[in-house]
Amino acid sequence: MIRDNYLDVSRITTDANVLKIFKIIRQYGGIVRFVGGAVRDALVGLKAANIDLSTDLSPDELAEACEDAGIRTVPIGLKIDTLGIVAGNELIEISSLKKQIKKEKGKTEVEFTDNWEADASRRDLTINAVYADENGNVFDYYNGIEDLEKGIIRFIGDANRQICEDYVRILRFFRFYSMFSKTPVDAKSLKACRDNLNGLKKLPIERIRDELLKILQTPKPAETLKIMFENNILSCWLADSPYLNDMEKLCGLEEKYSFAPDPIRRLYALYRPDKALAENIAVRLKFTKKQKENLIRLTEEKCGQRELGSPLPARQAVYRFGKDLCLDLLLLEEAQNHGEERNLEEIIRSVRNMTVPVFPISGKDIIRCGVSGNANIGATREKLEHIWFESGFVLTRDELLAKICQ
């Protein structure tokens, strides 16, 4: 259960402001430990994205300890068991240990404890219930380390109870399965997910959307989504996809050519939607304005090997669409091509290194030539830009301005 000096804490943080929190709480008579994702990720050699801490002090005691040490605290929204600690330029969330949460008549009551194992039992998965102190001692109450090493993803204790506490845990199960699994999906956990599917309908669609996008960014989204489709996990929001092989190939291309996983790009590969379907998906999942725009642009613009493989058409495409969209469209085209890759590496390098042309005419330039009125200025600029674009970006500023009088 306790592994002495097991973890190099520098994998979690080297921030002196964060480590100072351990000293402050210890001086007050409490204990604080890193918990959850920060410990889990450090154990497998990943950089911790977020740092969360747990303490056996109550929120009031924690606030008092920080006040005595001159450390500012911030309330964390509706999380009545959590306090935000300002550590340098970071806001660190510290949760007090709890053993029971009661929800009655719209009110939530938390029963706090100083028992670390009781707190661990309330966490969702065994791999997320591992704690570590500032000295690298690791506290593992439910064999999370062993499960992480073997790639087994499963709930702690009664999976049905865990899921009913927060139905988003169904989606979290599949997200962590895609991230860390090395074995077939755990049968008991999968059954519990299926048995409690109706609970997902009770969640705000934004929580569904956010977890789905996180799943799409994981290392094995195609394999994971296949399991989810087969078990109707997403049936209320998304239809089964006939293009899982395209997504799998896209993920391979992203890794091969050093592209960061992009959930919108992968979602497009999953459905190859036209504009109408893209808009439908965006509305159903309540995409943000930016997410919706990015998905729809992939349906509207056309750019691939033919355009990007030739110098002038490539520059014109990059000018019109930007490098990111051009590369997205290139990868998506290649993902649909299940033959041999054709000069893809060379084209990607060329686009990445390309200097984007800059239109040399401003509105002030046009006004100085005697054009007035916003509509006329805009129309003139558009005309000149079209001429410059068709010339292959070779016409100079003076040559373009000379055309205003023609």
Image: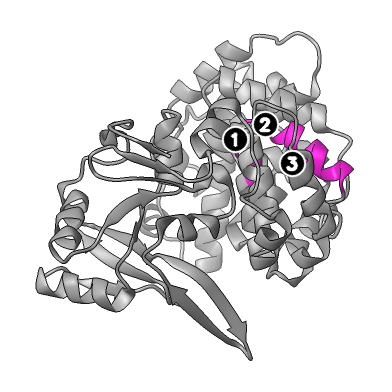
Give me the C-alpha separation between circle 2 and circle 3: 16 Å
Q: What residue type is labelled 3?
A: Tyr
Magenta stretch: give its range: 215-231
- Residue 85 at x, y = what percent? 26, 65
In this rendering, the answer to whether 396 lies above or below 95 is above
Q: Nearer the viewer, residue 127 or 231?
A: 127
Q: Which mark is residue 220?
A: 2
Residue, x 64% and y 16% (percent of image)?
309
Q: Which amino acid does label 2 sit on?
A: Lys
For discs 2 and 1, the disc positioned in front in the rendered view: 1
Mark 2 / mark 3, whichever is N-terminal:
2
Q: Mark 3 points at which residue?
A: 268
Mark 1: few, some, or many residues within 10 Å (few <14, many ≥20)? some
Q: Which element type, helix, strand or loop, lies under badge 1?
A: helix
Mark 3 / mark 1, whichever is N-terminal:
1
Give me the C-alpha separation between circle 3 and circle 1: 21 Å
Q: Which element type, helix, strand or loop, lies under badge 3?
A: helix
- Residue 283 at x, y = what percent? 75, 64
Residue 335 horizontal side relative to residue 154, left or right:
right
Q: Which element type, helix, strand or loop, lies under badge 2?
A: loop
- Residue 292 at x, y = what percent? 67, 56
For discs 2 and 3, the disc positioned in front in the rendered view: 2
* Discs 2, 3 touching: Cβ within 8 Å: no
* Discs 2, 1 touching: Cβ within 8 Å: yes
Mark 2 / mark 1, whichever is N-terminal:
1
Residue 356 horizontal side relative to residue 310, left or right:
left
Mark 3: few, some, or many residues within 10 Å (few <14, many ≥20)? many
Q: Mark 1 points at which residue?
A: 179
In this rendering, the answer to whether 2 lies above or below 353 is below
